[in-house]
Amino acid sequence: MKRRDFIQKTSAGTALITLGNLSLSSFATASEIKKITILHTNDVHSHIDPFGPEDGRNANKGGVARRASLIESIRKENPNTLLLDAGDIFQGTPYFNYYGGELEFKLMSMLKYDVATIGNHDFDNGIDGLFAQLPHAKFDFISANYNFSNTVMDTHVKPYKIFIKEGIKIGVFGLGIELEGLVDKSNYKETKYLNPIEISQEMTRILKTEEKCDLIICLSHLGYNYKNETDKISDLKLAEATKNIDLIIGGHTHTFLKKPTIVKNKEGNNMLVNQVGCYGINLGKIDFYFDSKKNVAANGTSIIV
Amino acid sequence: MYPYKIEGKQISISDSIQTNYEIDNFIKPYREHIFKDLDSVLAYSANTYSKTDGEFNTAIGNFMADAIYDQVNPVFKARTGKDIDMVILNHGGIRSIISKGNITTKTAFELMPFENTLVVVALKGTQIDSLVSYLCRSKKAHPISKLKLTIDKDFKVIDATIKGNKIDDSKTYYVTTNDFLYNGGDNMTFFKPNDSLYDLNYKIRNVLIDYFKKVDTISPVIDDRFIQIK
């Protein structure tokens, strides 16, 4: 039982173990175990090729063709895998300047991304530039707090998407950052930004109560945390202010974390916030294990990071 | 149903992961086109120019501001019948040096990696005064064209002219800058309010590329457009 050393024992985790009938060893032998793997990237910023050997910071890292191999091998191991991107797909290499995002979307489609949200840089060629590339994307875009109804993107972005993998219902909703002051108005045009906390409360109500999702994921481009701007909404703040979100996958701040952050939500339950830096040099991987025979309570989950 | 266990980790995409050749072959024609295009020679640079060479004006900054004036004025005139009076950029916006030798498309990308576009702002002479005091205060070689500024040892204006004429408080001047500065970037707050704004939808990088294509050799110099008399 050496693995137990790695378990970050939260109060919830302790409660689980004291239940007695749910020991770790019994998980290993349970027959009804279902595993959902969530893979994610953020802020890839048109980094299609790996960094060269001479790069001062990220030498020989990244590259879509390598990411493809990695994702393929993970999918082979577990077909119940979702691949998500938290925005800022565009801007950062000449691939974007030359092709306007066409290649980024085509490659993400070849890698079978399931869904992505929209980052501020995805407006860099204007909302029309984003719209023009949509035919190259075989995956969906989700954003619950951007109201696109007076723009060309109207009807092309849904607030959330539901996936069912081996009977497990997974709801994913998107959140975008305040565009005013960050993106030129002529680029985002009539896109309306709505309060992320209020929208998240609405989303979790729909996904939990109406849709009865087993897993709720927020795909966010709000940014991990703003130390010097205490009023600014971030993933950590959102996590604390909401309930029923199991995982926030973030972006925007290019935050490199040693491991996903465990946050106590509004109800005191543990959930995860993760972000994997930028430029496609890392892939995030979160595995959720379900056991239909031993349905634990919301606070009975052990989190191993 | 709730998950009983969650495991999270991050996997580094390193060179130990095999390249997927189906994907790589798909990228190849795009990559080759870009590299071929980026490496295409557009002009020749007589020297190496850096934004750190020069006190209040630099050869590279003068080149950028003058090139913008030359490229943009005909466009503006064709659209409005008016001439541009001056150009102002920011020193921080010069993102690299220009090296002696061949200038390629890549040079323009290095010099201007951002997608900023040019705008023309109609400013009253009184606002040009604010622009001039900004330049005096900033003590930086912000690139300018057609504006000439002489300051004393205390950074006070001795002389300021636009196209050789004293600044007239009641006149309207057509000032070209980029959208970033127009929106207050680098604390350039003097563009608002204004009489009118013309969005040229012309990217700075494309201006540079078009200019490089037009000329054979560039050999800009540090001149007397912005100097301090001590």
Image (cartoon, coloured by chain):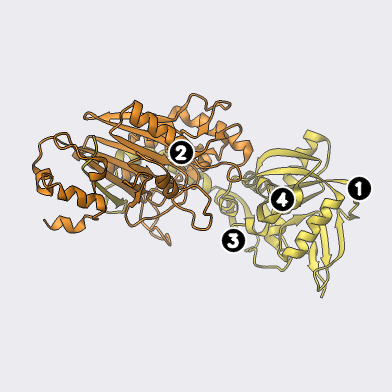
Chain colours: A orange, B yellow
Q: Position of residue A231 (x, y in %)?
A: 53, 51
Query: Can marks 1 and 3 be said to lie on one chain?
Result: yes
**Labels 1, 3: front one:** 1
Q: CA distance from mark 1 to mark 4?
A: 28 Å
Q: Residue at x 9, y 44 (%)?
A: A26
Q: Who comes first in sequence, dot 3 or dot 4?
A: 4
Q: Position of residue A129 (x, y in %)?
A: 55, 33
Instruction: Please name the residue that numbered disc 2 is placed on.
Output: A175
**Labels 3, 4: front one:** 4
Circle 1 Cα neighbour tier, 10 Å, few/some/many (<14 / 14–19 / ≥20): few
- The three-letter code of the residue at mark 4 reads Ala
Circle 3 Cα neighbour tier, 10 Å, few/some/many (<14 / 14–19 / ≥20): some
**Labels 2, 4: front one:** 2
Q: Residue at x 52, y 28 (%)?
A: A153
**Labels 1, 2: front one:** 2
Instruction: Please name the residue that numbered disc 1 is placed on.
Output: B170
- The three-letter code of the residue at mark 3 reads Ser
Query: Can marks 2 and 3 be said to lie on one chain?
Result: no
Whether residue B119 is situated above or below residue B10 in the rendered picture: above
Q: CA distance from mark 1 to mark 2?
A: 49 Å
Q: Who comes first in sequence, dot 1 or dot 3?
A: 3
Whether residue A196 is situated above or below residue B52 in the rendered picture: above
Q: CA distance from mark 1 to mark 3?
A: 43 Å
Label disc, if present, on residue B99 of the rendered structure: 3
Q: Chain of mark 3?
A: B
User: Callout 4: helix, strand or loop?
Assistant: helix
Q: Chain of mark 4?
A: B
User: Callout 3: helix, strand or loop?
Assistant: loop
